[in-house]
Image (cartoon, grey):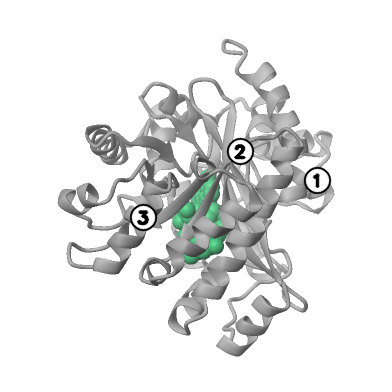
Amino acid sequence: MTEKSTIRILVVDDEPSALRLLSRMLANMGFASVIPCNSGHAALEQMDQADGSPDVILLDLNMPEMDGVEFVRKLVERRYTGSLILVSGEDERVLQATGNLVRAQQLTLLGSLQKPVTPKGLAALFGKWSPPLQNHPSRAAKEVYSADELRAAIANGELVNYYQPKVAVATHRVVGVETLVRWCHPVDGMVLPDQFIDIAETHGLIHDLTRTVLINALAQAKLWQEAGLVLQLGVNVSIDNLASLDFADFVTGLADKTGVPPQQVVLEVAENCIPAHDARVPLETLTRLRLKRFRLSIDDFGTGDSSLAQLRDVPFDELKIDGSFVHHASTDEVIRAKYDASLAIARELGMEVVAEGVEDRDDWDFLCSTECNLAQGYFIARPMPAADLPGWTQAWQERIRKEFAAIS
Ligand code: G
Ligand code: G
Ligand code: MN
């Protein structure tokens, strides 16, 4: 957990009384680093000279010289990566319209508050805040790793699996996890997969990588099983894995040896990796795995350009709607249309549906109003080390009781 005392907050409001009130409220909530600014210019000056940009900015929309919308544009120009809370005396629709503008710029909006701001409203929005780099605290900039470094890392056991829970929308039960690999680098700390999966794919290391991930994941599933936690286990596979003639035998042999039933293993294939009609080996691999009762899942659905024919060629069990068609679906018509279309395709082909990227309560409530089966995303849990899962599962039960009282 990040200490409240280390979160840097900038409050921007032209009214001295509002500025004082907000600052005092934040101080009472335990935030120690709060900087008041009486104009957009003052805030930008503060950001330019201070060491490190703020984590959260509370922004009043109605200011005489630089208004809130203009200030947001300056934040984009400065590549601000922190979060934003909008504050205004304007009506709900103005706040909502500005919120849409903010999100369209890919800024993180914790929410909007109408004046007069209450401590409760403020606390609710800060409850949504999480450090953007939580999973890789020690690394700021991207670095490029060589194939040799990665090869050594795989051989030295530096790859560790994180697991992100998937829960049933109707019952709230935890039904499974998705395995997400990380490189526990001795110097750089936790390195995320987007910094090494490509390298593995282009340098022929993806076979060793996926095998390592699978071996660790199945061993873990077995341990959970023995502890009474029966979970579906999702594992991401690359097209290169599918194109390898011995992959199906490897996976089958491993499940057999570990004692994890194939029905419990979900192999996730990104939509843009779904084999074409004439890709004989990948299609063979997927069909053989399905015959052995492994579950097949289409990942990141909506981001690729697969045809209906391609989707029909492979007996997929599950379709994961990409997070970009889930988050904000309740308020954005375009997102919602893509979500609905994805859901309809999955239903047409008899697949279970997983919504990815469920980030907040609005997303969750929206899913509950649709026929979606499973949900995954930061609102439920971030990817976590295996050791945290039993504790998280207990905490989730508790949360269900408190937050979703209507359903048990
Ligand atoms: O966890 P995030 O955790 O940042 O994952 C980023 C991307 O890396 C996702 O697209 C995910 O599918 C991919 N990824 C994570 N783990 C693996 C893995 O074990 N194998 C492959 N091929 N991709 C993975
Ligand atoms: O591509 P794939 O769906 O396998 O990868 C999942 C990726 O999405 C991982 O990087 C994971 O950390 C990330 N992720 C999981 N939940 C959320 C979420 O709620 N919001 C966002 N933005 N990313 C998420
Ligand atoms: Mn995935």
Q: Quadrant of the C terminus?
A: top right
- x and y, in percent, of residue 371 in the image: 36, 25
Give the mark nearest the N terminus, 1 or 3: 1
How many badges with numbers are in the image? Answer: 3
Residue at position x 69%, y 46% in the image: 222
Q: How many C-alpha atoms fall within 10 Å of the one at disc 2: few (<14), some, or many (≥20)?
A: some
**What percent of the width, then of the height, locates residue 150?**
61, 81
- Give 35 or 389, whichever is nearer the viewer: 389
Front residue of 407/56: it is 407
* Picture disc at residue 231: 2
Mark closest to the chain's N terminus, 2 or 3: 2
The three-letter code of the residue at mark 3 reads Arg
Residue at which label 1 appears: 4
Amino acid type for the residue under numbered disc 1: Lys
Answer with mark 1 or mark 2, whichever residue precedes in sequence.
1
Alpha carbon distance from label 1 to label 3: 52 Å
